Image (cartoon, rainbow, N blue to C red):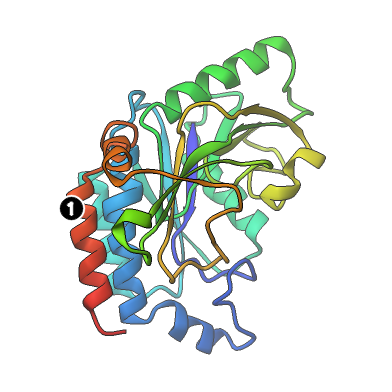
Amino acid sequence: MIGVCRFSYLGEGGFQTQHDDPAQAARILYDTARMLRRFAYFENICLPSLAAQTDPDFRLIALIGDTMPFRWRKRLKGLMDQFPFLEVCTLEAAGPLNATRRAFRRGWNGRATYITGFRIDDDDAVAIDYIARTRAVADQLLTLGWADEQTPAAICFHHGIYWDTTRPEEDQFWDFSEKEPLGLAAAMITTPEGMTNIYRWNHRKLASQVRCWIDPTDYMFLRSLHGHNDSDRTIPPGAQSLPPRLAKTLLRDRFGLMPNKLQAMIQHMTDAPT
């Protein structure tokens, strides 16, 4: 089980901050205010949810570019002491598939015949049993022959919470079951040498490209919206509002997060000058 998070990776495409001028793209990507926000999300949302996993046998690879300034590299690598599952992979600029293939291989133990690779953004979280449940499904799919060396298969959990921090507190949390695979809480079974992975296709097109095992039942992802997302995120049509008290209970019990600490962090960033 290996996850890859593209942490402000200045590659060839794949981000709205990408620019025809690499120097200008780097200035935008590594702007101090932006990087402080990215670390705040990563340290308070993504990493704690992974640290709370019931199955701790996995790796998370933070993929960064070799243009990232030293101060940010040092801070990121310092997190490896606090979160032993974390490893930093520094690469030159490359396309999304080539870069993530190398990142997944960085997390490979050199022995496993298959990799179940998942993707996650620095401002999102997965449920505390995500690793355990994904591994169990992957084992079953391999046993059934539904995935093999020539046939990748995706595992997608469609039910989660959208958290719009730009709204009033009573209107921030929304329950939604995705109608198509979401990049978050999705993984793909491949071989370590395979030419594809969960980043290969736009997640909305995933079901037209590979076999997909889908579960829309339990809460499995937390997707944050805060006005600084690289992708265009909005509350999906048809989402149902969650009462704040229930939502905070779910954040604590399902995602291993500290709601009061998160609210304080969000308020601090809202009040800070941009």
Judge left or right: residue 268 versus residue 54. left
Q: Amino acid at mark 1?
A: Lys
Q: As rendered, which of 198 and 261 lies closer to the eye?
A: 261
Say which quarter of the image contains residue 266.
bottom left
Q: Is residue 146 left or right of residue 182?
A: right
- In this view, the residue farthest toward the right is 208
Query: Which image quadrant: the C terminus?
Result: bottom left
Q: Residues within 10 Å of mark 1 (few under 14, many from 20)?
A: few
Of 244 and 48, nearer the camera is: 244
Q: Residue at x 37, y 67 (%)?
A: 166
Identify the residue at horizontal 79%, vertical 28% (top origin).
Answer: 150
172 or 262: which is nearer to us?
A: 172
Which element is circle 1 on? helix
Residue 49 appears at what percent x and percent y?
33, 40
Q: Residue furthest top?
A: 143
Q: Can residue 178 be spotted in the picture?
A: yes
- Is 166 situated left or right of 218 in this image? left
